[in-house]
Amino acid sequence: METKITIWKPISFGEQWLQVNTSKFDDIVPSWYAKRKEIKDDNKDFEDFLNRLKRHHAIETGIVEKLYDLSDGITQTFIKEGFIESFIGHEDTNIPAKLLMSYLKDHFDAMDFVFDLVKKNRPLSKSFILELHQLITMHQDYTFGIDSLGNYVKIPLLKGKFKEFENNPKRDDGTIYEYCPPIHTESEVDNLLKIFNELENKKIHPLIISSWFHHAFTQIHPFQDGNGRIARLLASLILIKNNLFPFTVKRDEKAEYIRALENADNNEPQNLVAYFSLIQRQNIETILNLQTTEVKSSSLQEIASIFNEKISIVQTKQKKQRQQILNENLDELFKLTYEIVGKVQKELFKIIPKEKALINAIGVNPKEDNYYWFTKQIIDYANQHNYYFNKYLPRGWFKISFTITKGKRYDLVITIHHFGYHDSVIAVGSFLQFTDENSDEQTIPIDIKPYTLSLENEITNETRFNVEEYLKDITKIGMTIIVNEIV
């Protein structure tokens, strides 16, 4: 029996969108904005980074929409090297290589078109959306539908035009999702753009605008086919306008993405905004971990001149004031971590009697003599998670020790150190140390990514919550490892 679910409602911006939590994005983005000011628009490293993002988006958007399949191996090669047909092996894709290359080129050109609109400061308009659709469907002549007998049939695709007939898809379980009727499509797109401009004028958080616009666009579903691709491109446009990065849904994240959209259908947008936030965090962490300062010189004198100029900048009053802010915020982070570790220790004492397993906690800040302990372990941890650790910048650590028997101890080490090549980005990470009087000390990795945050801004209540949540997760995972090792 068929079930119909009406997705479309007249487009509006509800109060629930202003109540979402964007703090995990806000914790890291100030460092990216600070670094962006230092990067010239013609910086080759930055340009290469953006081109890799464009290629990744071009590949994944077609896979998510089931236009083609592409193996992981050739995906990584294409992202790194570019779209070169001769790289494609017989088992890499399920469609002819030439057609695949045409689709990829269309998707890449569409993303370039988005960047071009932002660069030229063109307004987002209905005509631009239609042009964008024409571009992504350049080499797609058909879509598929179901006839009155329930058979799948090829249907000629309308390119650069809004739908003329209903496009309500049927899921595998027989559920039909009803989108905006064709008669209301154009007026709803007009309303969408009107509300978008109002939100921009009110300076609503760009992550909220982008995710709201994406969701509203999918509810309208204005095209016969290609709505998901256009929705992600337009969401990307809004982010790029705010010096952020394209919105790319990876193939293995499709289910999470669909669930988040369906939650937003039910007036629960937090998961969708969190998903947008996660993608931006990943891109920000990547760019902050790239060296984007180009020093090109042909003589010792020129290098010495650049060195002298940079030293002068470092010694300016403005730089000193900024460094003071970074130091104060780092001190605040250490105080916060000390409080959380103490709280965790008290919670453990309520459950585990001291005579069964002595639990001790200590902390060392960057001003103490042994701040540099665990340097090798931090390097290994950074390598494990593919980022650069600057051992010459301030750092420190905390340790929760679990003494099991005499001479047998596990130390849960929480390290606070710098992440990447920008001086305001901090990573909070962890690993286990096992000490046994009968064997050498061992390091046991904890397979959880570091939590990164910016020191450009003060530690907010939301940041406090995020750090505490992360440290409790670390403790839980660390203790799980210990429990499984105790025999």
Image: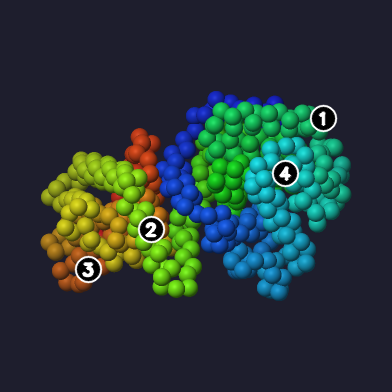
**Label 4 amino acid?**
Asn
Q: Which mark is residue 310?
A: 2
Say which of marks 4 and 3 sits in front: 4
Classify 116 as above or below 176. below
Mark 3 and mark 1 lie on one chain; the one further toward the N terminus is: 1
Q: Secondary structure at mark 3?
A: strand
Q: Is residue 349 left or right of residue 189?
A: left
* Front-lying residue, 387 or 181: 387
Q: Residue at 62% of width from left, 28% of height from top?
A: 198
Image coordinates of residue 45 in percent, x first then y, are 53, 62
The residue labelled by disc 3 is 441
Q: Secondary structure at mark 1?
A: helix
Give how far apart the Cα atoms at labels 4 and 1 are.
Answer: 17 Å
Classify 97 as above or below 325. below
Classify 302 as above or below 282. below
Q: Secondary structure at mark 4?
A: helix
Give how far apart the Cα atoms at labels 4 and 3 are.
Answer: 56 Å
The residue labelled by disc 4 is 227
Q: Residues within 10 Å of mark 2 (few under 14, many from 20)?
A: few
Mark 4 and mark 1 lie on one chain; the one further toward the N terminus is: 1
Give how far apart the Cα atoms at labels 4 and 2 are.
Answer: 49 Å
Q: Quadrant of the C terminus?
A: bottom left
Q: Residues within 10 Å of mark 1 (few under 14, many from 20)?
A: few
Give how far apart the Cα atoms at labels 2 and 3 are.
Answer: 43 Å
Q: Residue at 78% of width from left, 67% of height from top?
A: 98
Q: Is residue 123 left or right of residue 310?
A: right
